[in-house]
Image: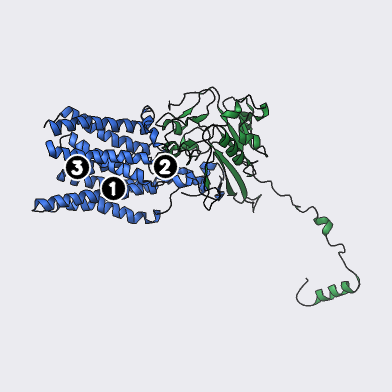
Amino acid sequence: MHPAPSVILFTTLSGLGFGLLAFLGLGYPGVTGWVAFVFYAIAYGLAVGGLLASTFHLGRPERALKAFGQWRTSWLSREGICAVAALLVMGLYAIGAVFFENHWPVLGMIGAGLSLGTVFTTSMIYTQLKTIPRWNMPLTPVMFLSFSLAGGALLAGQESLATWLLLTAAAIQLAYWWQGDKAFAASGTTMASATGLGGAGATLRAFEPPHTGSNYLLREFVHVVGRKHAQKLRAIALVIGFILPVLLLVLPVESTLVKHLMAALAVVAHMGGVAVSRWLFFAQAEHVVGLYYGKR
Amino acid sequence: MTELPTTTTRKMGLVIDLDTCVGCHACVISCKGWNTENYGAPLSDQDAYGADPVGTFLNRVHSFEVQPVASPTQPNPAAQLIHFPKSCLHCEDAPCVTVCPTGASYKRVEDGIVLVNESDCIGCGLCAWSCPYGARELDLAAGVMKKCTLCVDRIYNENLPEVDRVPSCVRTCPAGARHFGDLGDPDSAVSQLVVERGGMDLMPEMGTKPVNKYLPPRPKDTLEDQVDILAPLLAPAIEDPGGFLGWLDKALDKLPGGNA
């Protein structure tokens, strides 16, 4: 799949933003006043920024509001509704925390649920696609949620929890890669099933594409550039996204300033690592339509 | 509404004969022509006369090579080149419809045709992602999703002569490789053809239940012993030349080194 910067930014930023909102809604940290304002500004900046980035890959972004109508069948529609509901509920909760020095726990729990629901519905947009075996696995939503929780805990300053959540997310990432590498073969879709040709041991190959040039399908679904660095990028994603932040969290430091700087560095490293992982999520995903072109 | 209808009154679709298709791409051109000038946004091209031309097509013809395995009757079977036209299969369980967030994609109850309401399409591309067949293409100029309409503006068009009330690709095909009809009616000509020729689904494992069917290519004919019908006429006229050349031939044969 074409790794469009808009969708990579969207899933990376909004995943972190809604993760932070979930922790804030549950009262970790139970901040009020100006400190709460800063926390909510960061969370909303990431969540809304991500959602806005997602509209850049639309052909007709001016019609984006129409996307809320089909929640009965469409995960994209469900995601839109969930996101708006989470932002509204958490907005009310934030008003309580910032202006009235008050926490409304029921509202916060609903907001946290909706925030994680948004991450889940986002992941289901990809998971539902049978055409992309690497995404069509139960591990996909597990990975999205584990990243969101780990990043949220990191941003919320929940050090000990973040350490464990980062390690869990890294393990899930490894499992996702391990299973994902076998997914296309396991799906059973081959050039023979795509065309109904060959059979009984015959050799089948794509002889000639429909056009000498490229087209929308090849641009969107058949991405080969950069896959050759996949193993290196996996190592980079794992090290800077999870291992480095964990090291920065567990290193004993005396000074508060240094501790804050290291936490900030951990957040930046984690965001970079997640972005690399998301790039791979798209770039390594192979759509079955490539079989008609003899490509993956 | 993007919920799929539980049943459709008819299942209009195409039957494509892979045995007959000659790969001339006439269907591709007539499809592009008709659908650029009629229903919905035109099928645009980008950089059409430049170094890297691309464009939107609703029908594309691939070509595949099949090398059959050797058998006692055919020790050296010839490879087959199969031209493979591909357009929307108007699936009964169309994933492109249910994923649509706006309801722009829908499947008609009356004839099962899958269409896009272009004024509701936001161009998110998710329907194209969900289609295993690559039947949907986002038009870069219009920013909306384009797909085969089964020429919905031809098949019911009373301004056209009756013979033209079929999809443009079917009307154009010079080989008669494309057939149009109601695949929900077991007595229709297309349904009969599918039964007779063992029509097949593409990627049945995807569970899309495509309406369009493909007729498999027949194996290539076995060659008779005598291929060249002119060979008997071209045989040497004189089997046993006499005279000086005849003596020379025999003399040289007797020398060590064997017969030529």
Q: Residue at x 31, y 30 (%)?
A: A81
Check the picture and name the quadrant holding the C terminus of chain B: bottom right
Spatial distance from mark 1 to mark 2, Cα to Cα?
21 Å
* Residue B12 - label: none
Q: Residue at x 15, y 45 (%)?
A: A160
Check the picture and name the quadrant holding the N terminus of chain B: top left
* Residue A153 - label: 3
Chain colored blue: A
Q: Position of residue A235 (x, y in %)?
A: 30, 55
Q: Secondary structure at mark 3?
A: helix
Chain colored green: B
Q: Residues within 10 Å of mark 1 (few under 14, many from 20)?
A: many
* Residue A274 - label: 1
Tag in front: 2 or 3: 3
The answer to whether residue B206 is visible is yes
Q: Chain of mark 3?
A: A
